[in-house]
């Protein structure tokens, strides 16, 4: 994945920097001192990200070999709380144990006692649903059917899953979904294909939250659903900083040119990071205020 590739690059640059500092001088193959300036890259202090739990675990397994700290901003997997396995991992969000408790509280608040359960294949969905089921058994909640599916599964797989859930109707109309956003979207699309909009009520985890792209075009299928999201404060100072960023002044970020081309779907001719997939040339005067 991209996250692993970038982590390897960070580690490589860090090791090269440490070696150069120890040597104090660059040397050519013939044994003479090099006239090249000293390396400008410094040992890496830590890595922020990535977002998903499954990728964060892969990155942590690599970084901890080199004693490099990692701070995740949205990886909520329960497994990452195990400090014996992930001793250099930190995060700024609570684990899925609390989210599983919140999902169960919602179910109990509406006196639902017989529900189905679906989760995304992978660490996020599996560990989260495992926690939910454990709590459900303690509270006497019956789970009519439990299933899992990949976010990128084909239409026939989503249709098959939905047919299985329909077999438990009308008693198990509520479906607790510890799912990534695209899994929920796949379920909504299957509802439309099978003409069953309104037959189910989805209770979604923070993988769905308030993301517009999950329900865009399938709002009717999503009606009645309940989702949860971590309380997030609005940082207006960051918006002000971000919107004022310009290509010709933001030199401190080595990836900004790559981001700029992606954001405005244009290319920077002659730039080391030129993206030839875009036909339109960037003017450099595009504004993030117009394309937030």
Image: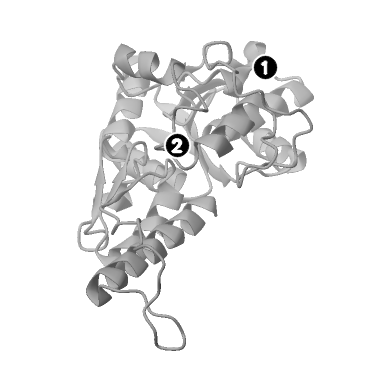
Work out whether residue 14 can be spotted.
yes
- Looking at the rendering, in which quadrant would you find the N terminus? bottom right
Which residue does the numbered mark 1 point to in the structure image? 218
Residue 233 to residue 57: above or below: above
Could you tell me which residue is drawn at 50 percent across and 35 percent down? Answer: 256
10 Å neighbourhood of mark 2: few (<14), some, or many (≥20)? some
Horizontal side of 121 relative to 45 (left or right) equals right
Residue beneath the point at 36% across and 68% down: 16
User: Would you say 52 lies left or right of 271 here?
Assistant: left
Looking at the picture, tell me which residue is in the foreground, 190 or 281.
281
Q: Which residue is painted at 63% across and 42% down in the image?
A: 271
In the image, residue 62 sits, relative to residue 247, either above or below, namely below
Q: Secondary structure under badge 1? A: loop
Residue 140 in sight in this render: no
x and y, in percent, of residue 280 in the image: 76, 28
User: SS class of the residue under badge 2?
Assistant: strand
Which mark is nearer the camera, 1 or 2? 1
Kindly identify which numbered label has been placed on residue 143: 2
Q: Is residue 113 left or right of residue 158?
A: left
Residue situated furthest bottom in the rendering: 30
Question: In this orientation, which residue lies closer to the viewer: 134 or 241?
Answer: 241
State the residue in front, 37 or 18: 37
Q: Position of residue 138 (x, y in %)?
A: 26, 39
Judged left or right of residue 210, residue 265 is: right
Pick whichever of labels 1 and 2 is earlier in the sequence. 2
Residue 215 drawn at (x, y percent): 61, 19
* Along the line of sight, the residue nearer the viewer: 163 or 230: 230
How many discs appear?
2
Question: x, y percentage for residue 79?
Answer: 31, 52
């Amino acid at each position: 994945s991209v996250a692993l590739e970038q982590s390897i690059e960070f580690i490589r640059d860090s090791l090269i920097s440490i070696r150069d500092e120890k040597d104090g001088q660059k040397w050519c193959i013939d044994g003479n001192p090099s006239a090249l300036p000293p390396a400008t890259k410094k040992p890496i202090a830590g890595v922020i990200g990535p977002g998903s739990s499954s990728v964060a675990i892969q990155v942590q397994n690599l970084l901890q070999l080199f004693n490099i700290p990692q701070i995740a901003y949205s990886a909520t997997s329960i497994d990452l709380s195990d400090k014996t396995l992930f001793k250099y991992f930190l995060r700024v969000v609570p684990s899925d144990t609390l989210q599983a408790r919140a999902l169960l509280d919602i179910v109990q608040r509406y006196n639902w006692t017989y529900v189905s359960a679906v989760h995304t294949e992978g660490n996020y969905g599996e560990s989260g649903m495992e926690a939910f089921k454990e709590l459900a058994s303690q509270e006497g909640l019956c789970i009519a059917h439990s299933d899992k599916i990949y976010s990128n599964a084909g239409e026939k797989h989503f249709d098959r899953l939905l047919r299985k859930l329909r077999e438990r109707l009308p008693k198990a109309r509520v479906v607790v979904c510890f799912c990534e956003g695209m899994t929920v979207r796949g379920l909504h699309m299957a509802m439309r294909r099978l003409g069953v909009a309104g037959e189910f009520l989805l209770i979604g985890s923070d993988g769905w939250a308030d993301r517009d792209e999950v329900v865009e075009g399938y709002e009717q299928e999503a009606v009645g659903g309940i989702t949860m999201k971590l309380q997030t404060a609005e940082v207006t100072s960051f918006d002000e900083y971000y919107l004022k960023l310009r290509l010709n002044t933001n030199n401190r970020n080595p990836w900004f040119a790559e981001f700029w081309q992606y954001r405005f779907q244009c290319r920077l001719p002659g730039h080391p990071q030129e993206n030839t997939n875009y036909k339109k040339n960037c003017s450099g005067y595009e504004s993030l205020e117009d394309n937030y």
